[in-house]
């Protein structure tokens, strides 16, 4: 068994948070803090259903682009 990979916390990187997969979608940007975390306020869709939720990072001189997605479910 190998040791887990080291994690580097990076402050000041811009992340884009998005609900939806096509225009119109709701999005907001936020910078990572000193603990590597970011948060943003978004308006949830007004209709019931499942919507894609994505967080994206655009590449910069030091880091490759990356993203993560999951469902956001609005229930009645």
Image (cartoon, rainbow, N blue to C red):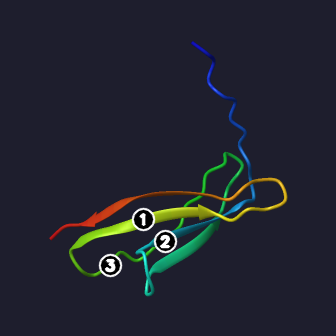
Q: Distance between the residues labelled 3 and 2?
A: 11 Å
User: Is disc 2 surrounded by few (<14), some (14 to 19) or many (20+) residues within 10 Å?
Assistant: many
Inspect this view and state whether residue 62 appears: yes
Task: Locate residue 27 relative to residue 62 in the image: left or right.
Answer: left
Residue at 72 percent across and 39 percent down: it is 8
Whichever of labels 1 and 3 marks the residue nearer the N terminus, that label is 3
Judged from the image, the secondary structure of the residue bearing numbered disc 2 is: strand
On the image, the x and y values in percent for residue 20 come to 40, 75
Check disc 1 and report the residue beneath it.
Answer: 53
Check disc 2 and report the residue beneath it.
Answer: 18
Whichever of labels 2 and 1 marks the residue nearer the N terminus, that label is 2
Q: Distance between the residues labelled 1 and 3?
A: 11 Å
Task: Locate residue 44 relative to residue 9 in the image: left or right.
Answer: left
Residue lying at the far bottom of the rendered structure: 24
When the figure is inspected, residue 71 is found, relative to residue 74, above or below; the finding is above
- Examine the image and state in which quarter residue 59 appears: bottom right
On the image, the x and y values in percent for residue 72 come to 33, 63
Residue at 74 percent across and 53 percent down: it is 11
24 vs 32, nearest the viewer:
24
The disc placed on residue 72 is none
Check disc 3 and report the residue beneath it.
Answer: 45
- Examine the image and state in which quarter residue 71 appears: bottom left
């Amino acid at each position: 068994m190998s040791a887990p990979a080291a994690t580097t916390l990076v402050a000041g990187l811009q992340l884009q948070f998005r609900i939806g997969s096509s225009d119109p979608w709701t999005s907001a940007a936020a910078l990572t803090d000193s603990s590597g975390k970011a948060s943003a306020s978004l308006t949830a869709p007004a209709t019931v259903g499942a919507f894609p939720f994505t967080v994206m990072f655009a590449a910069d001189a030091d880091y490759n682009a990356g993203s993560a997605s999951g469902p956001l479910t609005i229930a009645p």
